[in-house]
Image (cartoon, rainbow, N blue to C red):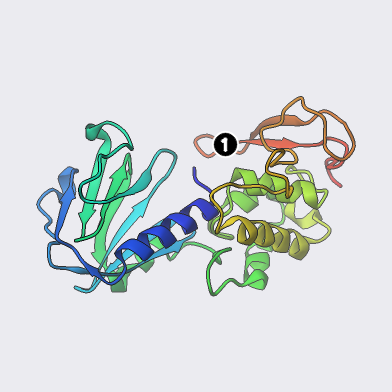
Amino acid sequence: MPEGDTVWLAAKRLDDALGGQALVSSDFRLPALATVDLAGVTILGVAPRGKHLLFRLDDGRTLHTHFRMEGAWHLYRPDARWRGGPAHTVRVVLTTAAWSAVGYRIPVVDLIATADEGSVVGHLGPDLLGPDWDAGAAVDRLQARPDMEIGEALLDQRNLAGIGAIYCCESLFLCGVSPFTPVGQVPDLSGLVTTAHRLLMRNAPRTSRSTTGDERRPYYVYSRRRQPCRRCGTLIESGEQGRAPRARVMYWCPRCQARGA
């Protein structure tokens, strides 16, 4: 599933291209919205909320999408060839005079009243990349379940929105905390949340991602199983955390992030 910075950057690009522009046509290639026609409707703006995208329209409605694991939005000039995948994977096409926004493999597409956005994003915790980010509120939500393992807790979008496995693993490494440590035993929960926020903010405007500051070696532990830790040389370990279908593969250094530390 895309990290919050990926969704944030997608929203910025879509907003830059479509914000304030009237739609010439729309094409929803899914049964529930197949008859919807947004021609003439203006897109007021495109906003991210955690891992959700909200296309706010001037007719009082919001087009809500979520990438999940496989979705992507591509922007093309009207006469350009689409290269995002086979035609049968296109779910939505939004066309203005200057751009076509093509949604590939997007599994969640809803058209709702803007006043009802809370029905799809109201459950989310503070948004790490949102203008109203509230670290204290995120810490309070995490502390509400002190027995939950911190790796699972960070990935629970109800606690804080936008963090995925990459930033979870990297933040825990930088703070020296095992992903299996209970929330109540994390020595500096506020510092951990602040670290995750800093990493996401640093990477949000970029097309490439790095938590180390070196794009040639972008990660400390993520996806580095059986490779030496960049700090101590111990081989990085990996394993699943959580229950299906929400189980995620986590990576950690068994020395720098000793369990229960």
Question: For the view shown, which residue lies furthest in the top direction?
Answer: 226
Q: Is residue 11 left or right of residue 158?
A: left
Give the residue displayed 83% in from the left and 38% down from the top.
Answer: 230
* Front-most of residues 99 and 186: 99
Give the residue displayed 73% in from the left and 50% down from the top.
Answer: 213
On the image, the x and y values in percent for residue 60 come to 22, 73
Give the residue displayed 53% in from the left and 39% down from the top.
Answer: 246
On the image, the x and y values in percent for residue 72 come to 38, 44
Say if 44 sits above or below 179 in the image. below
What amino acid is labelled 1 in the image? Ala
Question: Residue 229's image quarter?
Answer: top right
Q: Is there any visible trace of residue 2 in the rendered image?
A: yes
Badge 1 crowding class, 10 Å Cα cut-off, few under 14, some 14 to 19, many 20 or more, is few
On the image, the x and y values in percent for residue 123 come to 46, 62
Question: Residue 205's image quarter?
Answer: bottom right
Give the residue displayed 63% in from the left and 66% down from the top.
Answer: 138
Q: Is residue 2 left or right of residue 232?
A: left
Label 1: element kind: loop
Say if 26 sits above or below 67 in the image. below
On the image, the x and y values in percent for residue 44 come to 29, 72
Q: How many marks?
A: 1
Q: Is there any visible trace of residue 51 in the rendered image?
A: no
Say if 91 sits above or below 124 in the image. above
* Front-most of residues 32 and 44: 44
- Residue that carries the numbered disc 1 in the rendered image: 247
